[in-house]
Image (cartoon, grey):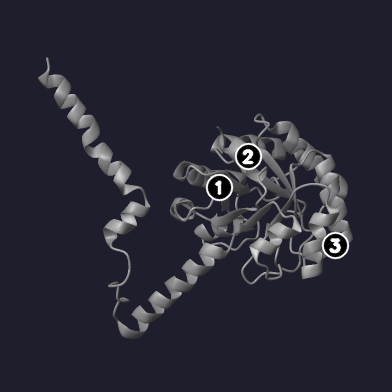
Amino acid sequence: MTAAATLRALLAQPDIVIAPGAYDGFTARLVERAGFPAVYMTGAGTSARYGLPDYGLLTMTEMVGNATTLADAVSIPVIADADTGYGTELNVVRTVRHYERSGAAAIHIEDQVAPKRCGHLEGKEIVSREEFVAKIRAAVFARRDPDFLIIARTDSRAVRDLDEAIARANLALEAGADMAFVEAVQSLDELAAVPQRVHGPCLLNVVRGGKTPNIDLRTANELGYRLAILPSLLIGEIADACMRALGQLKATGQPPALADGPTLQERFRQLGASEWDDMRTRFRSATLQTAGSE
């Protein structure tokens, strides 16, 4: 079963699919080890890998490269940020095909003007409805695996209003998108209205410190959302922990005590060391046994 087919099967189940955000192979493995059924490749986190803000500064090649890293690191489906598709409809065709080859199971494409901004920042601009829908049609046309999910993201709530965002989401679904992503709703009432008014499956984006109202994901499930992504969960926790450790080192000259933390061996096990240890002897032993029998 392909990753895309696995994701479709998950989305067909009654419960919401929760995909915490990861930005490299290690954090993707942590998501998988924690028991989540899918992982989200965050564009903001990918930008942070390069020391950059989420301002649409990365290229398609850089984003696809990170999607490949995550897909290689885990066996669960990877849902990836594909920003604006990196150009016109022609670029979208190429973008979809490269993401498919990366091993990702799904991507989302948005209606911001390039260079885009994080969906929870001010000052966004959006393209016309016609241009957005054309990109979605191009994405649907481009995919070779019919299970590969095309998620249509609209940032028009912040630029226009919720009615415009709902209209764009429905137009994208009519154009063949598999799921709608109405970004940065601004109240609990709006959050509840989206799955009621959108004529298809909906994604909920939960951003630490962002515009999305605080909500229990069990409630989101009851409201009708099918997929929840949490792009800032791990990178926020990791950044906070790093700054605490660095601050302590700077202030005291002493590294933080590690007595209560995981051992080095445990950290390596989180990265699959046991599997690699098994392979240290598997092939050599087989060779020696074959040589001894001749």
Q: Quadrant of the N terminus?
A: top right
Type of amino acid under label 3: Leu
Identified at 65% across, 60% down, the residue is 55
Using a 10 Å C-alpha cutoff, classify the residue at mark 2 as few (fewer than 14 neighbours), some (14 to 19) or many (20 or more): few
At mark 2, the secondary structure is helix
- Pick whichever, 104 or 76, lies toward us: 76
- Pick whichever, 46 or 104, lies toward us: 104
Identified at 70% across, 42% down, the residue is 150
Type of amino acid under label 2: Ala
Q: Is residue 293 left or right of residue 151?
A: left
- 1 or 3: tag closer to the N-terminus: 1
* Residue 9, label in figure: 2
At mark 1, the secondary structure is helix
Q: Is residue 265 left or right of residue 23?
A: left
Check disc 1 and report the residue beneath it: 62
Residue furthest to the top in view is: 294
- 2 or 1: tag closer to the N-terminus: 2
Identified at 65% across, 56% down, the residue is 228
Using a 10 Å C-alpha cutoff, classify the residue at mark 3 as few (fewer than 14 neighbours), some (14 to 19) or many (20 or more): many
Asked whether the viewer can see residue 118, the reply is no
User: Answer yes or no: do the residues labelled 3 and 2 have beta carbons within 8 Å?
Assistant: no
Mark 3, mark 2: which one is toward the viewer? 2
Check disc 3 and report the residue beneath it: 162
Type of amino acid under label 1: Glu
- Pick whichever, 77 or 119, lies toward us: 77
The answer to which image quadrant residue 275 occupies is top left
Tell me how far mark 1 sits from mark 3, CA to CA: 32 Å
Percent x, y of residue 68:
51, 42
Q: Quadrant of the C terminus?
A: top left
